[in-house]
Image (cartoon, grey):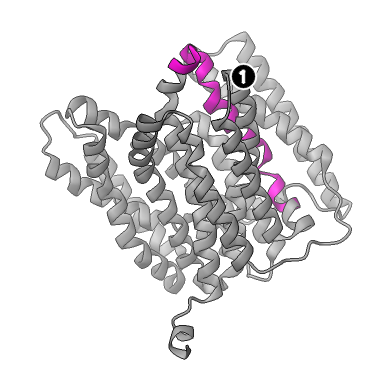
Amino acid sequence: MHALSRFRLAYKWQVALTVALGMLMSLMDSTIVNIAIPQMQRAFAANLHDIQWIITIYMITQAMVIPLAPSLTALLGGKRAYVWALCAFLLGSVLCGCAWNLPSLIVFRCLQGIGGGVLLPMVMILQMQAFPYDERGRAGSVMGLALMVAPTLGPFLGGYLVGSFGWQWAFFINVPLGAVAVALAQRILKPMQGQAGIRFDRSGFLTSACGTALLLYAAPDMLANGLTTSNTFLLVGSFIFLTLFVALERRRIRQGQMPLLDLRRFSDRTFTFSVLTQILVFFVWFGVLFLLPIYLQTLHQQTPQQAGIIQGAISLATLIVLPFGGWVADRLGPRTAVIPGLLLLACALAALMMLALDTPIWMLVCLFLFLGAANAMTNQVGVSALSQMKREEEQAIANASTLLSVLRAAAAPWV
């Protein structure tokens, strides 16, 4: 009994693994749903424009509700807010799998997006609050592992389930994973009391939600069709709402009230430059992970399974290097890990530009290993953004983590 207790994981690692499962479920869901799109298009006899709303409405809803995370943390406590987000995502997944037509599926995707939108910043909030100030690099490594495993595991699992049992299983797969995630959260996470006297920032939420929705709807249309009257009108409306949001938040801060998002965090130069760096890295990785399967399957004539195995080199290298990146960030500072990672990423991207039809597979695997190592090191950018905050500053961590998630979501349609 004493021997078992000695090998029991510390609470911080239990929290990290628990919330990583929730993050893995949410991220993997996106890749599986993408694989199921052709089958859903045939099932609903819908054109590509209409079926894309399955993806678009989830992305818009998710971005709209992300700013709720700090308020929910303050009102309910971190554990209850996280479990509620998991349950909303799980309920939305079940309803999506039971959808009888395209409109009902789109409506249920909204509910799933509400849970998924709050879930992602809550993962970062709980993880960063559980770890001491000087161990956040290792905490970020656990999150980075989930970020890499999801895109690798999703196509394999999704291809099998959707091909064998139908498109509904792109959503039903979340049921067992979600049930385990909820059970672990209830058992492991310590109860956290909400703050008394917190008034929800309704005006801030409405203006940010409207501004974000208009932006995320207009941006893809502008990239696809150029600048038109309709998308220009939507972009102007987005600018007006977001400007009003900033003005309302600044007034709320001056009055001593809790804002929806504390924009004063941008006065921290480390945070601001870390956020900009993370957005640029996000742009790069989104493009790479989108184009590599097309290159392997179309030009190299690899099957989806073969392409997934080859791309698995990225995940393998990330898995191996992540602990080292976290150790460097904790001991020498996040910048010491991030800058070599960015240089390595730039070199790997330059090599990707030289790919040809006859590039041997072994050379691709070596290149993907370099990409994975670069990803492991640049994963510490998020740790750098929070490096000026102590563990005791729980609300500051919640606001900063949510700002990171909001900006990533707002950047998505421009990739």
Mark 1 belongs to which amino acid? Pro
Q: Please give the name of the residue rendered at 71% of the width and 46% of the height, measured from the top-left corner.
A: 68
> Picture quarter containing residue 116?
top right
Q: Please give the name of the residue rendered at 22% of the width and 41% of the height, measured from the top-left corner.
A: 351
Q: Position of residue 43 (x, y in %)?
A: 46, 17
Q: Tell how many labels.
A: 1
Secondary structure mainly formed by the magenta segment: helix
Q: Please give the name of the residue rendered at 81% of the width and 53% of the height, measured from the top-left corner.
A: 258
With respect to residue 89, does 186 lie above or below?
below
> Picture quarter containing residue 251?
top right
Residue under pointer 1: 103
Q: Position of 211 compared to 346: left or right? A: right
- In the rendered image, is residue 276 in sight? no
Indicate whether residue 232 is drawn in magenta.
Answer: no
Q: Local crowd at mark 1 within 10 Å, few (<14), some, or many (≥20)?
A: some
Q: Position of residue 297 (x, y in %)?
A: 23, 29
Which span of residues is magenta-colored? Answer: 42-71
Q: Position of 354 compared to 151: left or right? A: left
Q: Position of residue 210 (x, y in %)?
A: 72, 29
